[in-house]
Amino acid sequence: MKKRLSGYDSNKRYFWSPAFDCVNDDDHLRIGAFDFGGDAGGIFPELYYITQRGATPCEMMQRFTSVDPGKLEKLIKELVQKRVLVSSILSPSEIFEVQSRMFKNEYDEETFLNPARLEEYRRKQLNRRPNLNETGKILLEQKEAYPELISQRRTYRTFDTDHRISMKTLSQLMSVFRQVCSEGEIRYYYASAGGLYPVDIYVYAKDNRVESVQGGLYYYSPIDNSLVLANSSCVITEAAHLFTNKDIFRSSALSLFFIYNADVSMPKYGGMAYFYACIDTGLMVGALTAVAELNDIGICSVGSMEFDRIKKYFHLNENQTLLHTVEAGLKPKI
């Protein structure tokens, strides 16, 4: 009879996350930034090896019969909670944080805390150019002005909170993501690798900020161009955002969440499907930006947020993960 571990699905396989390395000095185990002391050192590196191809909690327990079962179960549970052992695809932060180990960073943390040094860093990066022979330079001319949706575009960090977004404006904004069927062909207004469109969109509408739309979390369906109420009791607060983005969230009317659904594209492209989905998301935000400018809507890409605080409202499966978040609202009156 299999031993059932509380809090675990005995049939679920857990894998060692590539985001974590482990160091075992004198049986003193350190995994990433987490210190597990001496008691855990005795099962390494074997636990690391057997979880490369995945192992269930029961299989792990059976592998180390000489270890106190209570301590081992506690350790496995802690590794799962800290996302060292994972049963789902990784979040973007887990994937890309690993790259910083190999990057040779010439800047210390003080650079980004000191306004003068930060401005110096910013100016240097915005004026970068490769070391090429300037004699081969060709100057380009722009005689015709771009339309305002391009020339006047900027990021908005505050929005008009005195007026509501009309249903017509909301429809125009979201319809840029709709599925278009013409002569038996399905197409969208933006490009996607393989024509698979694996990025799902969820919209959080605040109470009394959009005409005829009650507050709550909605799934945007591109098939019939509709918003489907996913969770009416969902309440997202500024606590889900980093300090620098709290003010943006407080004045926005809508939050758009771009969720990668690996079930759509990984069967065809494998791990590269994740990379392609990131590109798809950039194209989607670009399309959204153009339509927003045409409809007096300001948007702001907020990047990182504390998504784990609100993830429960979305009821995502293990093959879905947040890629990006955009805050939107009426442009402030100047």
Image (cartoon, helix red, strand yellow):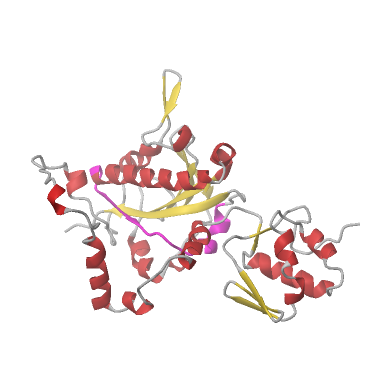
Q: Quick check: 157 left or right of 142?
A: right
Instruction: Give me the residue at 72% from left, 79% from top.
Output: 27
Q: Quick check: 21 left or right of 119?
A: right
Q: Position of residue 161 (x, y in %)?
A: 29, 59
Which residue extends farthest right?
1
Which of 148 and 97 lies nearest the eye of the viewer? 97
| Corner quadrant of residue 163 | bottom left
Instruction: Give me the residue at 58% from left, 71% from top.
Output: 32
- Residue 66 inside the magenta-drawn segment: no
**Which image quarter holds the N terminus?**
bottom right
Q: Position of residue 176 (x, y in %)?
A: 35, 38
Which of 215 and 253 lies nearest the eye of the viewer? 253
- Residue 303 inside the magenta-drawn segment: yes
Q: Position of residue 283 (x, y in %)?
A: 36, 43
Q: Is residue 209 above or below residue 283?
A: below
Q: Is residue 304 above or below residue 196?
A: below
Which residue extends farthest top?
183
| Corner quadrant of residue 80 | bottom right
| Corner quadrant of residue 207 | bottom left
Q: Is residue 145 visible?
A: yes
- The count of marks equals 0
Q: Position of residue 320 (x, y in %)?
A: 56, 49
Q: Quick check: 258 left or right of 145?
A: right
Residue stretch in magenta: 294-314
**Which image quarter holds the C terminus?**
bottom left
Which of 315 and 285 lies nearest the eye of the viewer? 285
